[in-house]
Image (spheres, rainbow, N blue to C red):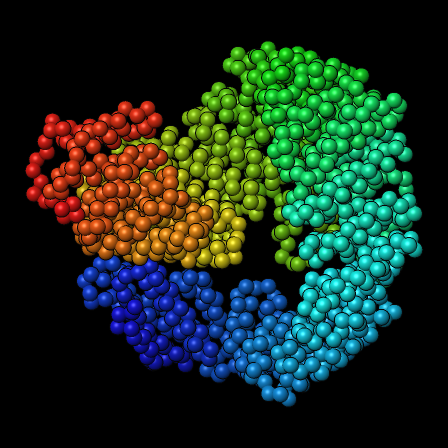
Amino acid sequence: QWHESNIVKDAAMPLQGSPCISLAASLPSMPFTSSFSAGICWMLRKAFVISLVVLALQGADGLQLDLSFVGSNSATAQRRTPSSFREVHTFERGQDVLLWRLPLPLPLKLRGGGGKEKDFCSQEYILTMLEDILSGDTKLIETAETNMDRNLNQPKFIQNLLNCAVSHKFSVEIRQLAAVIIRRKLKEFWEFLDDQQKENFQEEVYSSLFHDSTLSSLKLSKALANLIGESACISSSFTFFHSTMEKLFKLSQNEQLSVRSIALELIAEIFDVGGDEMGGYMDQLSDVAVASMSHYNNNVRRKGIKLALDMVTRGQQYEIKNHVLHMSHKMFWRAMQEKDSQTITSCLDFYIDMISFSWALFDVDRLEDIIDLAFKASQSPEFTSTARKKAIFMLSEVATLRGDALEERNLVRSVVERAIGNVKAILTSENVSEICEILIAENDPDEGIFSDEGEGEEAQTVLGTRIEGNSTYIWDYKMLLGRLMDSKASKIAIQVAFTYIEAAEGEEREEEADKTRSYMLRIMLIDSFCYGKSSAASLRKANLVGRVLNILSDKLFGGANELENYVFHTLCLFASTFPDEIRVNLDDKILALVVSNLHGRTNRKTAGFLLDFVQGLAKASCTSLVGHIPEILGFLFEQLASDRLQLHDRALNCLCCMATSMELNSERVGESIKVVGNLFDTLGNHSREEDDELDSLVVRAECVRSLGKLIRVSSSNTLKEHTFFCMERILMAFMGPEKETILREAALESLAEVVSILKQAFQPFLEMLVPALKACLDPTENLEDFIYGQKDELVDEAELSKAMERARTTGGRSNEEKANAVKVFGILAENVGESFSPHLKAVFPSIIRMLHTRNLQIRKESLWTIQSLMKFVVTYWSRPTPDGAQRPLLLAVSENLADEAIHAVLLVMQKCSEAELTGMACRTLVGIFEVVGWNFMKGYLDLVTRTLKDIMDNNIDFSVALELENVEYLLSSLLNAVCTISKLWKDHRVSKDELDLRLPVSNTKIFRNFFDEIYPSFLEWSSTHQPMWMQRLALGATGIVFTDIAVSQSSLDLERYAYHMLPVLNSSLSHIHSKFSMGRGKDVDMRLVQNAAACCGIIGTHCDRYTISASHGIFNLLLQLSDQKEINGFARDNIVASIARFCCSIYLDADEDTMQKAVALLFDAFPLRHDVSENMALVLFFKNLALSSAQVPNLSSYVIDNFTKFLEDPELVPKTSESLSQAIVGLLGFVSGENPPPPDPTSPPGFS
């Protein structure tokens, strides 16, 4: 769609002084007639610039680039295109070239001179390019890759690159990189080689691969082996491929374990690229894999398992799967007969890997046999601990079955039943108390037993040599049951388990020991119900939570003493997993029993469980807890007064949770503050053993945090009485020895709480606190700074040891401490008022400096604090205008601070590569602009425009393509910035007295220049090829800016932008309609429909003939979407309102049938109940309809009846704005004849 589509390239005179190339280009402009044209004209221009520069720099000493963008002769087109421009760039040899106007900075360096072209195919130059790629320098990497891509069709280049890969005189890294590049580009250059060159290629790679019989480098060997396999497939010449396979099969039997391991790895690697030829090696592959799986060496065994798994998962076309499964099954069965724990472990590893890949690889009959063997392996005391635990772990993989088919449901049911039987057998033969201790443990007591001993190449250690009692496997069965309950078949597993629980509940046993073991097993099953979200959801869905809680409560009263800890432990888990059910169904007898056990005689572990249970009830706001508050607080105070450090942190957490959730009275809060403060003093005054010193420090830190939390829930009287008591200890912790970093971090957290509560009453502490806070931000070299500050790759070990010793003895400022200090400054600025003014100038530079640290959290807190400081500056350091009508003017010192803040935030936006931080910086900039106002902000708008445009061009598309995290947050931040700038301009336009014409450069022109640069990105992001979330955000922001332009009463014409949005909206609505037509309406984001319809309504309300007349397609699409029943709520209301707005336009050109359908829709749709404000469009429609010459039967009675009901509707009245109510009253008055309007000479033709 180019006008005058000609690109002229003329050679001109060289630059004076040296041979150069001068290129001139003239690119014609074009009108923005579609969403494609709007963005792509700029991209084509930039792509042309790149091509010219690359061509010119190949052999020239310099370059002069003369680029002209010529405006169109069409007056209509000129109104919608940017101004014509001309750019001239001159670059000399040796100069780094960065064209910042390109979509991505393009680094180019002019090398050499004298106009002599370099030989890019020489081996020396290829080595240089490989070294550049390995250097890690982004610029050198891009240049080297570009040169390589350009020469891949040259046989000489291929031969020299291959020489680099196969020659033993080069380093392994160079050879490996060359081989990887050759393989990646193999298909591109292979067609340029003749048959002899192809044969030589394979021969050289083969010779290089087996030059050294030890295959010393695994990575290089893999790269070369893949070259042989892939080149053989491309050329269908398998001579060297077969030789390679035979050689590798031979090496896989080598006595040197390292050689055998690498050979197996290479066989697995080459398996993928071998094509149909691999089918001829089925027997050899199977033999090698199975033999390696039973090898004594860990490395060889792992490689054998990997090869077997590859054959099963990726070699199904060779019918290898059944063969390997049959052989592994046979090996498993034979190992069971021979009591070979090592082979059993290897087979189980193989099956676990297969299950992780896909259950579909197994047939059900074989899977049942494998599970049966695994159960036998887990029960047999003749096998090692590792083999038995591995067997239980493999059984837990049954949890990944979907449980859809009948066979799968039966399989899951069988595994659960047999697991319960095994646990029952263990409980019968082992000590109950010992098993309780194992089950209460938070982690597997034998965690890490599966880790391979002897990772080295020569390792020959056999895994698992222990044979232990059955009690050591109870934790594994607990994990097995938990995974089954939390599996995709959790419904079946829970049903089986609960059936056993109820059946056991009904049995009467005579022997006390059997009764205790029965209790134990039922509690263990209940414990497994709390394993994860799926098990909890299934238990709720089956309405079994209350019944399980009743059974568990019976155990509290009827269970044996040795079960007490485990019962309380399970009850705590149950309370945290089902807080709502606990709050409703908790029996007061249970709570009374728990409270009665809260005394000093309770052992530490039980007391810990009870504290966790009480805390869980407090978080759930359990009303039954209120009657027991005195006893619970008494126990908490008793624990805090004791020397049991291990329980102090739990007691403090429980106390704070109760104070926050249970609304303790002032007396109890005050008593709690005193107890916590006294504990802080006591722990600080007593010297302890070195082992207890850290525990004491942790508890003191928790005391400081607790004081802050208690201050937050204190009444005004409590604050008056205890503020100085709390602040004394908080400041003591903050200003203590530097090595007590934990205390300082806790003190800063509490200070944030206290300042936000005390507000201006905090003023007496400022003089003491601010200098200490500022000292936290002073530049000091900590361990992290030392390591990252080293220029050399290797850090000097002696210097590192000194830095570590300094960090250990002097503490230093941690990153968390700095982040909290920055946060406290922001809270001070927001809360303490003008008393913070004397400190601001000294603090501000430190906060700005924190923006340039490496730590992400510090930079985030700094951005938020800068925004708070700027609000403080505008609030307290501004000079109001004499008439008080305008925004207060900033003083000179305020302007300097604002200038420094804006430039610092913009620098973060320009240099940061992290999407979340860039988005936060953008939002901080918006916050600063909102407080300083348009008049101050407009001086920075050019810089802001360049920064936003650079991020939009470089970061967004790249992040979306790679699906990086936080890209949606970044995009919404950028769009929010544009919308805020638009709002500030609009508010200034509406509120100011003077005319723009009196200014040297009008505000409207400043905003127009800004939005002209940004708008092409809006069009690009709104297009249907973008993700739906991106379209939604872009269209929402477009609607906001369009509204601001329309109501600003400025000379900026909305037509300038709206016309170019029509193709985008048409495409978007068509895409949405097609989704619904194909039955895929669930894939559509209703917020996208809402925003697209809102944009259409704005265009229909505020645009003139030129745009409205081109919108008939959009109007028809809106009518079609209104028929979709799946579209409801706000989206449908916006569609109906947009149709009404188009109908009110005198420029809408629609046929009679379409208009009749639209009118009928609007009559049926009133009132709009979700987006009530959109009823204003229907008010205007009915008013215009009454004014028109259209003959509508009973129009007056319809309007009077329905709009009167609207004003009386109790659901709609609270949502109705005053302006909408007045408009309805006016319409009713007009229709009833009370307020006849003046005659309107124009009659909307659409209603005729």
For residue 455, side relative to residue 199 (left or right): right
Residue at x 29%, y 69% (from the top left corner): 2
| Residue 407 position within the rendered picture, expressed as x and y whole percent measured from the top left | 70, 49
659 vs 867, nearest the viewer = 659
For residue 284, side relative to residue 72 (left or right): right
The N terminus - image quarter:
bottom left
775 vs 12, nearest the viewer = 12
- Note whether 104 is above or below 505 in the view shown: below
442 vs 716, nearest the viewer = 442
| Residue 515 position within the rendered picture, expressed as x and y whole percent measured from the top left | 84, 25
- Using the rendered view, name the quadrant where residue 812 is placed: top right
Number of on-image labels: 0
- Residue 201 seen: no
| Residue 227 position within the rendered picture, expressed as x and y whole percent measured from the top left | 66, 75
| Residue 184 position within the rendered picture, expressed as x and y whole percent measured from the top left | 60, 72
Residue at x 84%, y 60% (from the top left corner): 330
288 vs 1055, nearest the viewer = 288
Residue at x 33%, y 77% (from the top left corner): 9
For residue 807, side relative to residue 29 (left or right): right
- Note whether 157 is above or below 552 in the view shown: below
- Residue 1110 seen: yes
Toward the front, the furthest residue is: 406
For residue 674, side relative to residue 520 (left or right): left
Residue at x 48%, y 50% (from the top left corner): 967
- Using the rendered view, name the quadrant where residue 282 is placed: bottom right
